[in-house]
Image: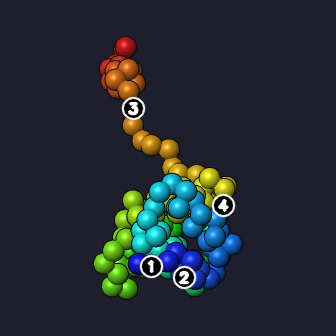
Amino acid sequence: MRNPSSVRVRGPLEPFAAGFAAELGRVGYSPVAASFQLQLMAHASRWLEANGLDAGALSAGTVGRFLAARRAAGYTNYLSGRAMAPLLGYLRGLGAAPAAPPLKGPKTPAEVLLELLRRVPGA
């Protein structure tokens, strides 16, 4: 079984690694799952450093470029925004990464109706 504390994070995300590991344990991640998340964090941190970026650069576009680079490097796991969600949520909660972009489109039936009415000429 993997031990999350054995994963070494270097680069701009290093200051957040211990807190992220603790948060993963607090919310119920198994040691193996936490280790995989920390390995993803370590890779993201190395990538950020290689590109001269810090945690504050982790916008949706930057995350997309990181995941594309991960795929191009031959990684077969943890290749989606969903895989990055725990790390991004943690960093956003600390104010270290940009807030998530607002969801597009209406959310409730009333908002759907209002949107349709706005499109009707003369309404």
Check if mark 2's residue and mark 1's residue have beta carbons within 8 Å.
Answer: yes
Foreground: disc 2 or disc 4? 2
Quarter-wise, where is residue 98 in the image?
bottom right
The answer to whether residue 11 is above or below residue 112 is below
Res 49 visible: no
Q: Is residue 82 left or right of residue 52?
A: left
x, y percent for residue 67: 41, 72
Numbered circle sitting on residue 107? 3
Q: Write down the residue under mark 4.
A: 96
| Disc 1: CA contacts within 10 A as few (<14), some (14-19) or many (>=20) | few
Amino acid bearing label 2: Ser
Instruction: Tell me the distance, in whole angstroms, between the alpha carbons under discs 1 and 4.
Output: 27 Å
Quarter-wise, where is residue 17 in the image?
bottom right
Reading the chain from its start, which is encountered first: label 1 or label 3?
Answer: 1
Instruction: Tell me the distance, in whole angstroms, between the alpha carbons under discs 2 and 3.
Output: 42 Å
Reading the chain from its start, which is encountered first: label 4 or label 3?
Answer: 4
Res 123 visible: yes
Q: Residue at x 53, y 51 (%)?
A: 100
Amino acid bearing label 1: Arg
Check if mark 2's residue and mark 3's residue have beta carbons within 8 Å.
Answer: no
Q: Secondary structure at mark 2?
A: helix
| Disc 3: CA contacts within 10 A as few (<14), some (14-19) or many (>=20) | few
Reading the chain from its start, which is encountered first: label 2 or label 4?
Answer: 2
x, y percent for residue 37: 47, 70
Q: Residue at x 58, y 52 (%)?
A: 99
The answer to whether residue 103 is above or below residue 36 is above
Amino acid bearing label 4: Ala
Q: Write down the residue under mark 1.
A: 2
Numbered circle sitting on residue 6? 2
